[in-house]
Image: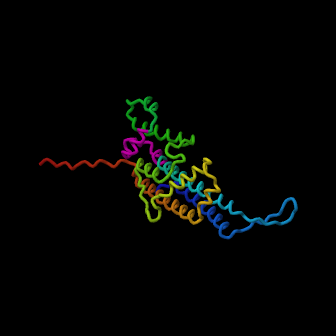
Amino acid sequence: MVVMQSKILFVERRDDIEKYFDFVKFIIDDKPAFSFRNKLTGVDEEKKIDIEMTHILKANMFILLYNLIEATAANAIEDIHSQLSKNPDLCVDQLCEKITKMALKRIDSNVVGNMNFANAEVAKLVLRAWLNEHDKLVKENKNPLFSGNVDARVIREVADEYGFSSVTNASRTRNGGNLVKIKKARNSLAHGSESFLNKGQETSIDALKELKDEVFNYLEEILENIQQYLDGQLYLRPPIIQPNQQLAV
């Protein structure tokens, strides 16, 4: 079984979000007060968390959930590229047709122009050029696939390009239908077009739990699809089966 770093990181970040959610829910349900010693007077005092702060804390869940979605999707694609890079003899024409077309479409035309097509290993060079160009963009924080735009539709499109399944159990995941809501909320908060206070005020803690659970279930199933894709080497082009030739009598 291929070890997927994206799965490891997903579990770590999922657990962080669970802890954050439990903390916010505790504040809302139990209404605890903070006890502290006033530095000026030396007197022990108590302060409750006001309701506006709970709204801000709730809104921050959209940032955490979106970051998990984009990071998980991006890391999973890096797991695929890592497997492709491990085989030095792999050629672009050995990959499934969808990846071959994507690689040829995304490779820089200047890189292609400088290639020696008389070289018998040009198919290897094309694959390496695409993988290297992708790595360079990722390291420059210019991910060619994901940048503040990730929802279920984008994940389905990328799955189609690479050839892995995006099918999930709709009863658990709603097919990621709420990812677009999380993306829009995150972008409006990150760009300042909506305040954290207002966003949290219009979102109940129960609604956040539903969103959280849907995201977790959806990403888990997408990662499992990619696990099967990598383990079965479904990124490779299936061998062409020649029809049996009849023996001459």
**Residue sitting at x 44%, y 65%:** 171
Pick out the residue farthest to the left. 249
**Residue sitting at x 52%, y 50%:** 75
- In percent of width and height, residue 86 lies at 47, 46
Judging depth in this view, the residue of 68 and 55 nearest the camera is: 55
Residue 64 in view (yes/no): yes
**Residue sitting at x 74%, y 67%:** 33
User: Would residue 163 appear left or right of 146 to someone viewing this image?
Assistant: left
Judging depth in this view, the residue of 210 and 12 nearest the camera is: 210
- In the picture shown, does residue 244 fall above or below 22? above
Q: What secondary structure characterizes most of the magenta part? A: helix
* Residue 103 lies within the magenta run: yes
Residue stretch in magenta: 82-105
**Residue sitting at x 62%, y 63%:** 21
- In percent of width and height, residue 158 lies at 44, 49
Residue 5 in view (yes/no): no
- In percent of width and height, residue 247 lies at 16, 48
- In the picture shown, does residue 145 fall above or below 39? above
* Residue 45 lies within the magenta run: no
Judging depth in this view, the residue of 12 and 119 nearest the camera is: 12
